[in-house]
Amino acid sequence: MNIYLLRHGETEENAKKSYYGGLDVGISEKGIRQCINVKKHIEGINFDRVYLSESKRAYQSAEIVLSDSKNYIVDSRINELSFGEFEGKSYEDIKRLYPKEEKKWRECWKSFSPPGGESYVELYGRVESFMKGIETIEEDNILVVTHGGIIRAVYTYILGGNLELFWKFSCKNCDIALIKYEYGNWFIDSIIHGGI
């Protein structure tokens, strides 16, 4: 089984380097160009299923990248990390406005939850549940249009679930990764920087 992981096109919040997992923003003009560019990497692939997060940016990216309309499966387990009160703020803003919380975040990033948000451990739990569900499906090609944090968590899952590996991967807007599940084994086949 082939699973294609596509990170959505760039947004204005990406360009501003904001933390914004839960803000429902659309893609920018640059994000549109990235999606048009990445389309050539998946043209001709017949996707049996297309999964999207609940975000506008994932939906818009899927609409541009896919040649024909699909029956999307929207799944909240592949929503980006919720940053709670940190949403829409830069790291400098967070350090200034939430100095105690920022210190805790640095010291224990895996289990720390921003006020009103969730931890990376919680995010990983969602992704693990999603991936275990995918393992039960018998399809040839699946497209998952989602977010950088989710894709890093998928790589972490494939490599055994050690969250220390989470930051060992790059994941740019409109990157497309091909992962495969064969004979009960996951592996990363390729990662393409599809955006411009």
Image (cartoon, helix red, strand yellow):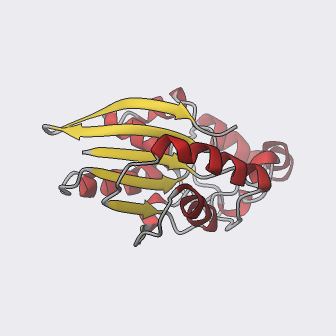
Q: Looking at the rendering, in which quadrant would you find the N terminus?
A: top left
Question: For residue 144, what is the image quadrant?
Answer: bottom left
Relative to 37, does residue 61 appear above or below in the rendering?
Answer: below
At horizontal 55% and vertical 48% (from top left) the residue drawn is 39
- Measured as percent of width and height from the top left, residue 184 is found at 15, 39
Q: Looking at the rendering, in which quadrant would you find the C terminus?
A: top right
Residue 146 at least partly seen: yes
- Measured as percent of width and height from the top left, residue 166 is found at 49, 35
At horizontal 65% and vertical 36% (from top left) the residue drawn is 106
- Measured as percent of width and height from the top left, residue 137 is found at 20, 57
**What is the tally of numbered marks visible in this picture?**
0
Q: Nearer the viewer, residue 122 or 115?
A: 122
The residue most toward the front is 44
Q: Nearer the viewer, residue 159 or 179?
A: 179
At horizontal 13% and vertical 37% (from top left) the residue drawn is 183
Relative to 177, does residue 47 appear above or below in the rendering?
Answer: below
At horizontal 39% and vertical 38% (from top left) the residue drawn is 178
- Measured as percent of width and height from the top left, residue 53 is found at 50, 63
Left or right side of 151 for 137: left
Q: Nearer the viewer, residue 61 or 151?
A: 61
The residue most toward the top is 168
Left or right side of 6 for 181: left
Left or right side of 173 for 87: right
Q: Nearer the viewer, residue 66 or 84?
A: 66
The residue most toward the bottom is 71
Residue 19 at least partly seen: no
Left or right side of 131 for 107: right
